[in-house]
Image (cartoon, rainbow, N blue to C red):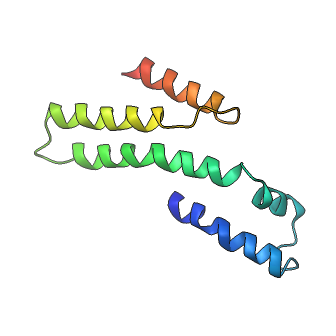
Amino acid sequence: MLDSISRLEICLKEVIAENSNIITSEAVKTIINRKRGFFNDVYNLANIMKPIRDAILSLESNKSTLADCYFSLECLGQSINKIPYDNENVRFRQHAIKSFNETF
């Protein structure tokens, strides 16, 4: 679902550019027109949620092993480390790393 939201960015920007009267809320227009913001946050969240979803699906199997669990944690750790370390993502990245380290 998060991937489909991030794919909407181009479509919504075109709607605002060509038919600005369709979206009447100025707050929504502001969110859509930002260079970085909502859609980048959704993209980063989707990149974190995918390994979690994959891990849950894998570990629900009757044939899963401790190695599967370890591999899933490695994938999650890698996805957290891939979060860009820029001014807008610093707090989210630090929180994700801290939570991962405290839990695992």
Q: How far across and down, in percent of the image, does residue 35 sit?
A: 75, 53
**What's the residue at 53%, 65% (across, down)?**
4
- At horizontal 54% and vertical 46% (from top left) the residue drawn is 45
Point out residue 27 in the picture as x, y percentages from the top left corner: 85, 58
Up-down: is 24 above or below 40? below
Residue 28 drawn above or below residue 76: below
Q: Is residue 31 above or below residue 71?
A: below
Q: Quadrant of the C terminus?
A: top left
Compared to residue 68, the image places residue 102 above or below, namely above
- Horizontal arrangement in the rendering, residue 79 relative to residue 36 (left or right): left
**On the image, which quarter does residue 85 sit in?**
top right
Q: Quadrant of residue 13?
A: bottom right
Q: Residue at x 49, y 25 (%)?
A: 97
Image point 39% across, 35% down: which residue?
78
The mark tally for this picture is 0
Residue 47: x and y in percent read 47, 47
Q: Is residue 30 left or right of residue 84?
A: right
